[in-house]
Amino acid sequence: MAATAIVPVLTATAATTPHADKTSFAPPPVLTIERPAPADTHSAEISVLTYNVRGLPWPIATGRAKALKKIGAELAAMRAEGRQPDVVLIQEDFRSEVSDLVKTSGYRYWAQGPTRGERASGTAPEDGRKYRRVRYVRFGEGWGKFTSAGLHVLSDVPMVEVRNTPYRFCAGFDCLANKGAMLVRLAPPDLPQDLDIINTHLNSRGASRVPVKRSLRAHNLQTEELNAFINNHWKAETPLLIGGDFNVRNAPERYDYQAAERPYVVVSEFCNHPSNPCDGQPPVDGEQPWLRSQDLQAFASDGAVSVRPVRVEKVFGPQPGRRRLSDHDGYLVRYRFSWNAEVAAAAAPAPAPAQGTPTETPQVASSDVKMSGKP
């Protein structure tokens, strides 16, 4: 097996305090190096599913309560077969039936993203001062927040900390939801370090109902806010995984914005390189798979534990004789983490997973609190 180093990912050290303000950063380009792994290398794998479940309220959408329950049942069926994702990142679930989805799926830990009333922390992007917050009142701007961010993280791995931030900037009907980002810190018992995972949902394009130039500007400002959130809260010595609905399908002007300043590597771009093959996504010259979907996953590691994707898969897609459960497919990625014997020997024991049956009420993590598993 070959170990993969991603160097360098981030040149600045990320702060873990909830309101630390940082200046912008511009890490050098990412370089992928394949090298033989030493005999004492340890490794473990974790799978992450990101899924926009279209949990819109009535009358915007109908039949969604039943669909959410079916999604929970599908996740439970995957669990019964031993192939459930270790972590699930959910976007666009604004309905109370999300609790049915969680309980049915059997995940022990559940964290929710920004609530309807939460406000952003930290410093706003400087170029956002010229952005007029309310311009298209007819299309939802200035109406206030009607819902939360719709973000949820489900996990079989203990959660030890949660951080949320709504985005300050939005466009059109997207402004009715308090869209933003959330970071969940996990303590996987198979890893020698914690694992940070971020879930996010960025401004739509056509669904916002405002001019493309307006929605693009909001999306760009949200991208800046996401990068700042990562820089402020990610512990750079630990591995980082990111997933969500980035709303970049067929929109290179969105995807490419500040691409050189990203503190992460996009999975579909990494796997499309001939030197980084991933099961489920063979490299194809001239293809840009990262622009074929709204949904992305990404990863970074600047410490002793390296990480790379090894397999990608679409789930919850169209099937003969059955309607899709959402207007998105689920995007499932399996990651491999590698570290040497010295790191393993120095690692503190990770918290043991909470005991109990999958039918028990899951442990809920609220915003900005420490977490521990049930006794």
Image (cartoon, grey):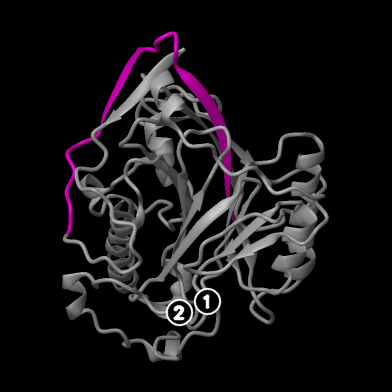
Residue 64 falls within the magenta-colored stretch: no
Q: Residue at x 19, y 43 (%)?
A: 11
Vertical position of residue 82 compared to residue 144: above or below? above
Classify residue 343 as left or right of residue 88.
Answer: left
Q: Which residue is at the front of the view, 260 or 300?
A: 300
Q: Quadrant of the C terminus?
A: bottom right
Kindly indicate whether the residue at mark 1 contacts the one at mark 2 (C-beta within 8 angstroms): yes
Residue 47 falls within the magenta-colored stretch: yes
Vertical position of residue 341 compared to residue 145: above or below? above
Q: Residue at x 44, y 8 (%)?
A: 39
Query: Whole-Å distance between the Cαs marked 2 and 1?
Result: 5 Å
Q: Which residue is at the front of the view, 235 or 11?
A: 235
Give residue 211's quadrant in the image: bottom left
Q: Could you say where residue 316 lies in the image, as x and y percent from the top left?
A: 68, 47
**Amino acid found under the numbered disc labelled 1:** Thr
Give residue 326's quadrant in the image: bottom right
Classify residue 239 as left or right of residue 364.
Answer: left
Q: Could you say where residue 35 lies in the image, as x and y percent from the top left?
A: 33, 13
Q: Could you say where residue 88 lies in the image, as x and y percent from the top left?
A: 61, 50
- Residue 132 visible (yes or no): yes
Residue beneath disc 2: 118
- Residue 312 visible (yes or no): no
Numbered label attached to residue 107: none
**Amino acid found under the numbered disc labelled 2:** Glu
Q: Could you say where residue 361 lies in the image, as x and y percent from the top left?
A: 77, 62
Q: Residue at x 61, y 40 (%)?
A: 314
- Mark 1 packing: few (<14 Cα in 10 Å), some, or many (20+)? many
- Mark 2 packing: few (<14 Cα in 10 Å), some, or many (20+)? some
Numbered label attached to residue 115: 1
Range of residues picked out in magenta: 24-51
